[in-house]
Amino acid sequence: MGGTRTRRPRTRSAVVAIAATTGLLLTGCGEETPAAEEEPVEDVLEDVREDESPADEPEIPFEEIPGDELVEPVFDGLYDEGFLADIDAYLDREVVLSGEVADVLSETAFAMTAAGNPAVEPIVVVTPDPVPAVEPGAPVRVAGTLEAAFQILAVEEEQGIELEDPLFEEYAGSPFLLADTVEVTSG
């Protein structure tokens, strides 16, 4: 997460403007004062600078700016029955999943299932870049956004990739992971 940003009230320029305006107005009315008795503008500005020491002004924190920091995943764990039971809570959000490659579908996509439990329905993992050398049975950890429904044409268009349609047809309409990172783990 980024540090706290602060801003200081902009009183210095307001005080200088008021002092200058007041000086102009006062010189136009009343008795004429010899120029030697007037306080020079530089002295007025120096007085303003001395009165506004940074330690005297409170720091005002800005609100967090969306997208200004790394997004914490809402789920970081195993791709298994427990994850699938709550999958709707994770849609359109960042997740980190650990599982096992069930099938390599292309250089930018593979199907992942629960490690040691191939009975768990596989989920498609798509990356904009080629996936590291993965093969069926390899343990992986993937991080990205869980999307609601896999649509071949939409994914191809949005990611600028080409997918072999017949390999992906069985996943059409199912949730999928648009991965930012894919890491082959040791198990």
Image (cartoon, helix red, strand yellow):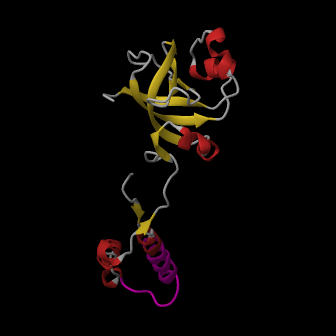
At 36% from the left edge and 84% from the top edge, which residue is drawn?
34
- Where is residue 116 shown, x and y percent of the image? 44, 29
Q: Is residue 47 left or right of residue 109?
A: left
* Number of numbered labels in the structure image: 0
Residue 44 appears at what percent x and percent y? Answer: 34, 77
Q: Can residue 3 be spotted in the picture?
A: yes
Image vertical order of residue 115 relative to residue 132, above or below: below
In the rendered structure, which segment of residues is drawn in magenta? 16-34
Residue in the image at 64% along x and 19% along y: 157
Residue lying farthest to the bottom in this orientation: 31
Residue sitting at 66 percent across and 35 percent down?
148
Q: Is residue 32 magenta?
A: yes
Among all residues in the image, which is located at the extreme right?
173
- Nearest the viewer among 102 and 176 is 102
Provide residue 47's location: percent of width, then percent of height: 31, 78
Chief secondary structure of the magenta span?
helix
Q: Please name whichever residue, 173 or 170, is drawn nearer the observer in this view of the structure.
A: 170
> 8 or 14, which lies in front?
8
Q: Position of residue 57 (x, y in %)?
A: 37, 75
> Considering the image in quadrants, where does the C terminus appear?
top left
For residue 50, what is the image quadrant? bottom left
Vertical side of 78 occupied by 30: above or below: below
Residue 91 covered by magenta stretch: no
- The image quadrant that residue 13 belongs to is bottom left
Q: Is residue 46 visible?
A: no
Query: What residue is at 57 percent from the left and 21 percent from the top?
Result: 159
Left or right: 86 in relation to 75: right
Q: Is residue 133 above or below residue 50?
A: above
